[in-house]
Image: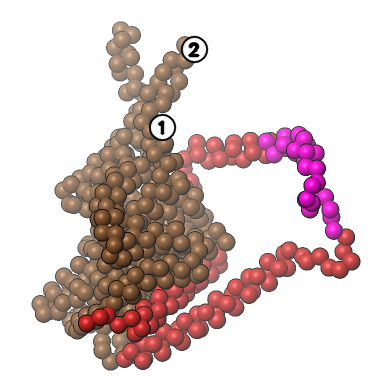
Chain colours: A red, B brown
Amino acid sequence: MKKTLILILTILTLVSTLMVSAYAVDESSVEADLVSKPEVGDEVNSSTIPTIGADTTSVADDTSVEESSVADSSVADSTVAETEEDGNIDINFTTENMSTSLEHMGLGLLGVMIVLSLIAIVVFILNKVFKPQA
Amino acid sequence: MDSIEILFRYFGHISWQMPVMWVIGAILIYLAIKKDMEPTLLLPMGFGAILMNLPTPLERVDGVLVPAEGVSEVLETLYNAGIANELFPLILFIGIGAMIDFGPLLSNPKMLLFGAAAQFGIFFTYFVASLFFPIKDAASIGIIGAADGPTAIVVSRALESNFIGAITVAAYSYMALVPIIQPPVIRLITTRKERMIRMEYKPAAVSKTTRILFPIIITVLAGLFAPASVALVGFLMFGNLIRECGVLDNLSQTAQKELANLVTLFLGITIAFTMRGEKFLQPATLLIMGLGLFAFVFDTVGGVMLAKLMNMFTKKKINPMVGAAGISAFPMSSRVIHKMGLKEDPQNFLLMHSTAANVSGQIASVIAGGLILGLVQG
């Protein structure tokens, strides 16, 4: 009975870990694609990279940047205020989020199963290693 | 005449939502006092719902009447101090951790799987809710199925859901309604023969070292797989470590009683800050209540189905009802299953098995909450 259980748990854990690893690798490759790596010979835009001792006051003094950000935030605030003032939030049937939520559902269930299975295995090992004193 | 007008001027400020919220508040208070349903939270929430839906006092500034600071500002201060930063639910978790005895689970670790299976309702409801709500709200609604108030608050707060009030009310109400929700669902998906399966209970002694290492290892595992759950799991396990270490009995007692009571006292009334009529009384609230029930039903189904699946591969049969105790509503669910077992067979004692599944549900729900946060926040 115990052997069967351990076998099932181990297989489940291994399969789940492999699936999640595959997913994680897939995701990280997408992220890596998004952040393009500078290659040898590429010109690096020095204005975006702060260097030690660099004069940063020019950035702080740049009021146009501040003004534009203030203007942006006021727009954002007004949007929020309108939403809050309305109170009502429309409910519309939409399948727009279906694929994302379905993916989250699968990964979430898998994640819970993996973590709980691992905990079960750890507890089983702990019980074997640390026997209670008579 | 003017004085009379001053006396009655606030009557003109009563919107239609206010009396409705007073009725809702009264119902919550009634359920808490008369039906003994989660009174520690439903009563403060009910009173808070009334408190939050009274006309705002007015004061004259430069000859013009403007809204003055009222009780809502006090509750807002409490809300920002304890809920917006998730402090109250997390502190409450120390108390809950100190209350839980993981012994039955440690002596029978396979019960942990039921805790995982009984989180099915969370994710399935999240999927269904995403057909009506934005992802963040859908995930927050799904977490009602965690059957765990503090987790529901933390997740919906972290995801900045628009429905935190309705979600909290649903989570706590359905937790209290477990004895009504679970039995018909279990009866529907199990046969009498399955419900009569007897399970032997041979408690294996668990060493003190295991009891001490358990909360530490769980925290580390949760941190590796679902870092977003570390705050929840960490505080829960910290409470449990205080209990099990054997040298902090005073702290353990304080966490279980004074600390838990004090935080609960503020938690309920502070949550009411989100129960302002204009925001609470929406068709969405009704739908959230329905989806919350849906989550609890499918949690139960998930647990029972895993037990049935395991019975296909094991010689020692598991009573499928025990799987349903994998939800986090502790200790209601384990008691319900025990009573159902006794009803079918007066010699069938399922309490320890269902308690093991039930405490595993406590861990699983917190981890599920962390996973949802991680997945949705990206």
The tag on residue A59 is none
Callout 2 secondary element: loop
Residue type marked 2: Asp
Q: In the rendered image, is residue B292 in sight?
A: no
Q: In the rendered image, is residue B376 in sight?
A: yes
Callout 1 secondary element: helix
Q: How many neighbours does mark 2 have within 10 angstroms: few (below 14), some (14-19), or many (20 or more)?
A: few
Q: Which residue is mark 2?
A: B62
Residue type marked 1: Glu
Name the residue at 29% across, 46% down: B262
- Picture coordinates of residue B115, whole percent (x, y): 35, 72
- Picture coordinates of residue B99, whole percent (x, y): 27, 61
Q: Earlier in the sequence, mark 1 or mark 2?
A: 2
- Nearer-the-camera pick, A80 or B204: B204
Which of the 4 image quarters holds residue A125? bottom left
Name the residue at 79% across, 47% down: A53
Name the residue at 81% across, 65% down: A38
Q: Are marks 1 and 2 on the same chain?
A: yes
- Picture coordinates of residue B202, whole percent (x, y): 20, 83
Q: Which residue is mark 1?
A: B73
Q: Where does the C terminus of chain A fall, quadrant-wise?
A: bottom left
Dot 2: chain letter = B
State which region is magenta.
Answer: A44-70
